[in-house]
Image: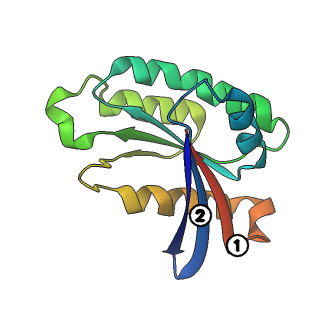
Amino acid sequence: MGSLTKKEIVDSSPCVLEILDTAGTEQFASMRDLYIKNGHGFIVMYSLTNHQTFQDISSMKNVITRVKGSQPAPILLVANKFDLDCQREVSTAEGNALAQLWDCPFIEASAKDRINVNEVFATIVREMNLTQENRQKKNYCCCTLL
């Protein structure tokens, strides 16, 4: 589990992102729940080259829903490793279908080749800015990368 702070300009507005990368680990479940409780937006990511990671993310969505309770926060579904499309095990259609079920945006990206990475952060910031609570906190965003 790691964290970093990233300054971004999204739609001409400065934003500071506090990012926690849980890497899907259950080892720090109590700490993860605390970050989820305090988070304003969530990027739930799976590897498009590994169908098991796609199946496993539903449990993370359930954790977010449980911890956030009556204060839901936006989620962005991301398929990573787009650079390895030739090894794809999860179709774009499957990702889109899950995003529709979760009622959230979906992006395919590659962290390695920096494909759509900026779009991932811009999208979650836009989603967070749409929520009533975060309209008052426009210059500070906290997202958790799960």
The tag on residue 8 is none
Q: Position of residue 71 (x, y in %)?
A: 82, 44
Image quarter in which the C terminus is found: top right
Verify CB contact (< 8 Å) between mark 2 and mark 1. Answer: no
**Element type where label 1 sits in the image:** loop
Image quarter in which the N terminus is found: top right
Determine the residue positioned at 50% across, 46% down.
Answer: 105
Residue occupied by mark 2: 17
Q: Position of residue 13 (x, y in %)?
A: 58, 80
**Element type where label 2 sits in the image:** strand
Q: Is residue 21 left or right of residue 111?
A: right
- Cα distance, mark 2 to mark 1? 11 Å
What's under tag 2, amino acid-wise?
Leu
Residue occupied by mark 1: 138
Q: Position of residue 140 (x, y in %)?
A: 68, 69
Say whether disc 2 or disc 1 marks the residue closer to the N-terminus: 2
What's under tag 1, amino acid-wise?
Lys
Q: Judge whether 17 appears above or below 14 on screen.
A: above
Q: Nearer the viewer, mark 2 or mark 1?
A: 2
Q: Judge whether 110 appears above or below 27 on screen.
A: below
Determine the residue positioned at 60% across, 73% down.
Answer: 15
Q: Judge whether 37 appears above or below 4 on screen.
A: above
Residue that extends furthest to the right in the rendered view of this protein:
70
> How many residues crowd mark 1 within 10 Å: few (<14), some (14–19), many (20+)?
some
Q: Is residue 120 left or right of residue 114?
A: right
